[in-house]
Image (cartoon, helix red, strand yellow):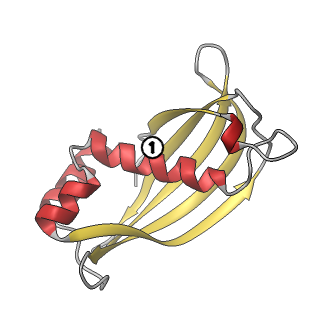
């Protein structure tokens, strides 16, 4: 859908690592979730407000991951997000975790994911259409 990329910085802390001193594999899911949340926030779409005002929430419906290289304690990472598809009730994004250089530029690809997020009614968790104002903000962002 777009080549526009959202970038979110992350630092690897002790709590993110396993006994070997590398990022525990499941923590990439947390990094990706935080980047999606901050991307929405950058569009003026706080998830708590969406739930309270529109009665909708976004939930992960499907995810594919590929691990490429390990991240280690104190590494500076950049989590990237690109919108791949915007459906009536779902959104698909591509996300990547990169180790960065001293200037914050991507250096080494660590993990990549394709994530499909569904829009659901917060009370019933039944599928719901993405509200028009939310769709418009996402579309404007992808258009640059």
Q: Quadrant of the C terminus?
A: top left
Placement of 114 over or under 98, stated as above or below: below
The answer to whether residue 59 is left or right of residue 110 is: left
Using the rendered view, name the quadrant where residue 102 is placed. top right
Residue at 21% from the left image edge and 44% from the top image edge? 44
Q: Residue furthest right?
A: 20
* Residue that numbered label 1 is attached to: 3
Residue nearer the viewer, 13 or 92: 13
The answer to whether residue 129 is left or right of residue 102 is: left
| Residue 69 percent location from the top left of the image | 80, 43
The answer to whether residue 102 is left or right of residue 9 is: right
Residue nearer the viewer, 7 or 46: 46
Using the rendered view, name the quadrant where residue 121 is placed. bottom left
Residue at 83% from the left image edge and 38% from the top image edge? 21
Placement of 49 over or under 73, stated as above or below: below
Using the rendered view, name the quadrant where residue 10 is placed. top right
Q: Residue furthest top?
A: 103
| Residue 118 percent location from the top left of the image | 37, 72
Residue at 74% from the left image edge and 44% from the top image edge? 23
Q: Quadrant of the N terminus?
A: bottom left
């Amino acid at each position: 859908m777009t080549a526009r990329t959202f970038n979110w910085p992350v630092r690897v802390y002790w709590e993110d690592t396993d006994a070997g001193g590398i990022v525990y594999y499941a923590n990439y899911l947390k990094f990706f979730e935080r980047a999606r949340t901050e991307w929405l926030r950058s569009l003026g779409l706080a998830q708590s407000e969406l739930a309270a005002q529109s009665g909708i929430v976004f939930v992960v419906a499907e995810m594919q991951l590929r691990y490429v290289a390990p991240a280690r304690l104190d590494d500076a990472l950049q989590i990237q997000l690109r919108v791949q598809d915007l459906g009536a009730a779902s959104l698909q994004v591509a996300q990547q975790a990169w180790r960065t250089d001293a200037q914050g530029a991507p250096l080494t690809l660590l993990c990549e994911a394709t994530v499909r997020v569904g829009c659901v009614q917060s009370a019933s968790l039944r599928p719901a259409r993405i509200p028009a104002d939310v769709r418009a903000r996402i579309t404007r962002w992808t258009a640059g």
